[in-house]
């Protein structure tokens, strides 16, 4: 691997820098797959399974991950609307 001078990285989002300049994903592939599966469970109104996967993801990547916070809010909202 050769280090290169990178222009225009100042002020860029860290995810952008990871993906564009460092040529890596912002998340490991297994985490991305689990987050996609979580979204599919929520879309299918499978809230018990979604909650289980949500808890597993929280243990892996933490409580403050925006994708997980959003998923929890969406689950709550859909549960309330369903009643």
Image (spheres, rainbow, N blue to C red):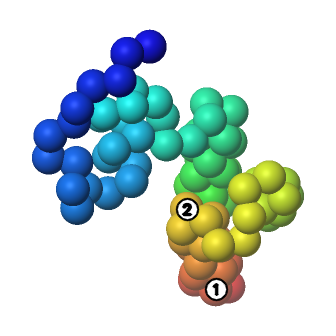
Near-viewer residue (8 or 40): 8
Q: Residue 57 has which mark?
A: none
Residue at image location 49% in from the left, 42% down from the top: 26
Residue 14 x, y percent position in the rendering: 39, 53
The residue under label 2 is: 67
Q: Which residue is label 1 attached to?
A: 80
Vertical arrangement, residue 77 with respect to residue 29, above or below: below
Please report the residue visible at 23 percent of the width from the left and 32 percent of the height from the top: 5
Query: Position of 63 compared to 10: left or right?
Result: right
Secondary structure under tag 1 reads helix
Residue at the limit of the structure toward the top, as seen here = 1
Above or below, 83 against 40 in this view is below
Return the x and y of residue 15 as percentages of the image width and height. Answer: 40, 49
Q: Residues within 10 Å of mark 2 (few under 14, many from 20)?
A: few
**So how many labels did they put on this image?**
2
Q: Is residue 82 visible?
A: no
37 in relation to 41, above or below: above
In which quadrant of the rendered image does the C terminus lie? bottom right
Q: Residues within 10 Å of mark 1 (few under 14, many from 20)?
A: few
Picture quadrant of residue 1? top left
In the rendered view, does 23 fall on the left or right side of 66? Answer: left
Judge from the rendering whether residue 32 lies leftward or rightward of residue 56; answer left or right. Answer: left
Q: Position of residue 33 (x, y in %)?
A: 63, 35
Given contact means CB atoms under 8 Å apart, are the residues at marks 1 and 2 in contact? no
Looking at the rendered structure, the secondary structure element under dot 2 is helix
Of circles 1 and 2, which is in front? 2
């Amino acid at each position: 691997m050769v280090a290169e001078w990178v222009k225009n990285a100042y002020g860029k989002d860290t995810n952008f820098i990871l993906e564009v300049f460092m040529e890596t994903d912002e998340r490991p592939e297994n985490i991305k797959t689990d987050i996609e599966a979580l979204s599919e469970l929520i879309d299918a109104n499978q809230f018990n399974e979604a909650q289980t996967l949500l808890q597993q993801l929280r243990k892996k990547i933490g409580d403050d991950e925006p994708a997980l916070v959003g998923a929890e809010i969406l689950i709550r909202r859909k549960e309330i609307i369903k009643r």
